[in-house]
Image (cartoon, rainbow, N blue to C red):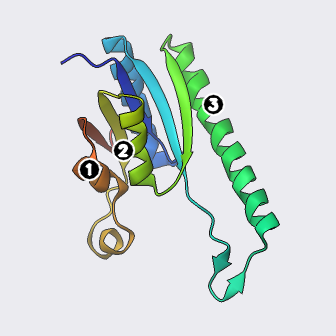
Amino acid sequence: MTVKRILHASDFSPASRPAFRLGQDLAKALKAELILFHAVSPIAPMMGEGYIPTSLVEELRGQTRRDGERRLEALARTARRGRIRVSTLLAEGPAAEAIVKAAKRKRAGLIVIGTRGRTGLARMLLGSVAERVVRTATCPVLTVGARRA
């Protein structure tokens, strides 16, 4: 199997750091491009019983996108220091769905994603982005536990 592009999906949490490191290692070893990806959650104009003005929703959306782009670029600088070909991609939407769409669009041969290791009720209530990606991706998915050394 030849992998030319590896998509690393990050939420910028500590749980995603081991997956980022492994994604870099794999990209370097395989001489593959590392695509750094982040999904921005959509901001709903309704919260509870209140309404958020459209202008505020757009301002929040813009701030969230700029923050995501800034953080992706910081990861990209780290990867470039390791002489890895890297690109960044930010999309809006539910994380699992956005990751799978981005991997297809960019023709990634592998997705590398971190897991938080939630179990029991927390996993049932919050779900697992990594699990949904594994179930729906058309390319192999490598999940990396948060406790990986």
Q: Is residue 57 above or below residue 14?
A: below
Q: CA distance from mark 3 to mark 1?
A: 29 Å
141 lies left or right of 55 = left
Q: Residues within 10 Å of mark 3 (few under 14, many from 20)?
A: few
> Looking at the image, which residue sits at the far bottom?
49
Which secondary structure lies at badge 2?
helix
Q: Which residue is mark 2?
A: 100
Closer-to-camera residue (149/44): 44
136 lies left or right of 146 = left
Q: Please identify the quadrant where the N terminus is shown.
A: top left
Name the residue located 23 percent from the left edge and 35 percent from the top edge: 140
| First along the sequence among labels 3 and 1 | 3
Name the residue located 73 percent from the left edge and 65 percent from the top edge: 57
Q: Residues within 10 Å of mark 1 (few under 14, many from 20)?
A: some
Total numbered badges shown on the rendered structure: 3
Mark nearest the camera among 2 and 3 is 2
Q: CA distance from mark 2 to mark 1?
A: 7 Å
95 lies left or right of 90 = left
Where is residue 120 shown, x and y percent of the image? 26, 72
Q: Is residue 2 above or below residue 21?
A: above
> Looking at the image, which residue sits at the far right?
55
Which amino acid type is marked by label 1? Thr
Which secondary structure lies at badge 3?
helix
* Residues at circles 2 and 1 in contact by the CB criterion of under 8 Å: yes
Residue 136: mark in rendering: 1
Name the residue located 37 percent from the left edge and 27 percent from the top edge: 6
Q: Which residue is mark 3?
A: 74
Where is residue 122 shown, x and y percent of the image? 35, 72
Q: Is residue 51 visible?
A: yes
User: Picture quarter containing residue 90?
Assistant: top right
Closer-to-camera residue (101/147): 101
84 lies left or right of 31 = right
